[in-house]
Image (cartoon, rainbow, N blue to C red):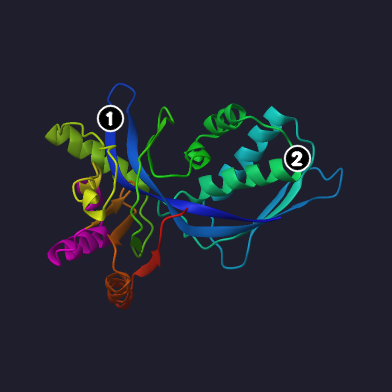
Amino acid sequence: MVIKANSRLRIAVAAKYDEQANEVTTSSLVFPLAFQDTIDIDFLAPGFPHDIIHYASNSRHIGEKAIIDQALNVMRNYLKIKECFHIKIHKTVPTGYGLGSGASNAWHIMMAIIKMLKLKVTKNELLKIAYEIGHEVSYFATNKIATFNSKTQEIELVKSTIKPYILLIFPRKIVMKEKITEDYVTLLNANKAEESQLNTAEISKINDLKDRLTNDFLSAALKIDDINFLYNDLKKANTPYFGIAGRGTTVFVFSESRSIIRKLREKYRKLGFNALITTLHT
């Protein structure tokens, strides 16, 4: 079976720091992207002792395989699956930039296996499996524009009718989210910033994004040279709808004009950045 696993973009983030637990949790406004990986899944011979998961040539997976391994183990425990699988992942979505492809791959692989085995599984059972896996896998059970809480894994749909072009611009070096989180906590303790809230009202036109592209990790992310350059360059150019995604690992631009997005893509590619155009996943 050949499947597609789309990515997602966290365009707004409200963070909450629990000083006693030394834990940062987030609520994010999440957009599903059409940008996706392709995955081949086949049965292994009966009696084969374990799954085989590998990535096509030139793919980089960093920590993604561990999420998929965990998903398969949790699914087996819940659904008593005995079969083993050969899984080959053709990466398109770059890893390490906060686009959730590891979580998406895990979810879509589970759905494919359930279909291949013709299992009857309720939505509540699927969510229970996803909650145990963590890594925001449960978002892809909904896979629509929504707010998502990283701690409770609660999802609230946000109605939207916009169909923008989206430019993703990646820093030239992978930014570790742990570093962003540490800098966020340091700045938070120094400035005692107030907690922000996400707007969950309907998005009926692109201008509705104007006041929503807020991210509590912005100040910490701007300590990274590439993020700082990209963010301030877009700001100087009076780009209407742009921001940093997630914990500051990707810069994005929304526009209804494909030509504007194309010009920006070429500009940043000439400056040595990996930049690509996508749309919303439907």
Residue type indicated by callout 1: Tyr
Quadrant (top left/top right/bottom left/bottom right) for the N terminus: bottom right
Q: Nearer the viewer, residue 246 or 111?
A: 111
Give the residue drawn at x 33%, y 40%: 28
Tell me the SS state at disc 1: strand
Residue type indicated by callout 2: Lys
Left or right: residue 61 compared with residue 69: left
Mark 1, Cα crowd under 10 Å, few <14 / some 14-19 / many 20+, is: some
Residue 193 % position (x, y): 15, 34
Q: How many marks?
A: 2
The disc placed on residue 183 is none
Give the residue drawn at x 27%, y 38%: 201
Residue labelled with disc 2: 118
Residue 235 falls in image quadrant: bottom left
Q: Does residue 63 appear anywhere in the picture?
A: no
Q: Is 135 rendered above or below residue 279?
A: above
- Verify whether residue 225 appears in magenta: yes
Label 2 to label 1, Cα distance in Å? 43 Å
Mark 1 or mark 2, which is nearer the start of the sequence? 1
Magenta stretch, residue numbers: 219-240
Give the residue drawn at x 29%, y 59%: 254
Q: Magenta stretch mostly in which secondary structure?
A: helix
Q: Nearer the viewer, residue 193 or 116?
A: 116
Residue labelled with disc 1: 17
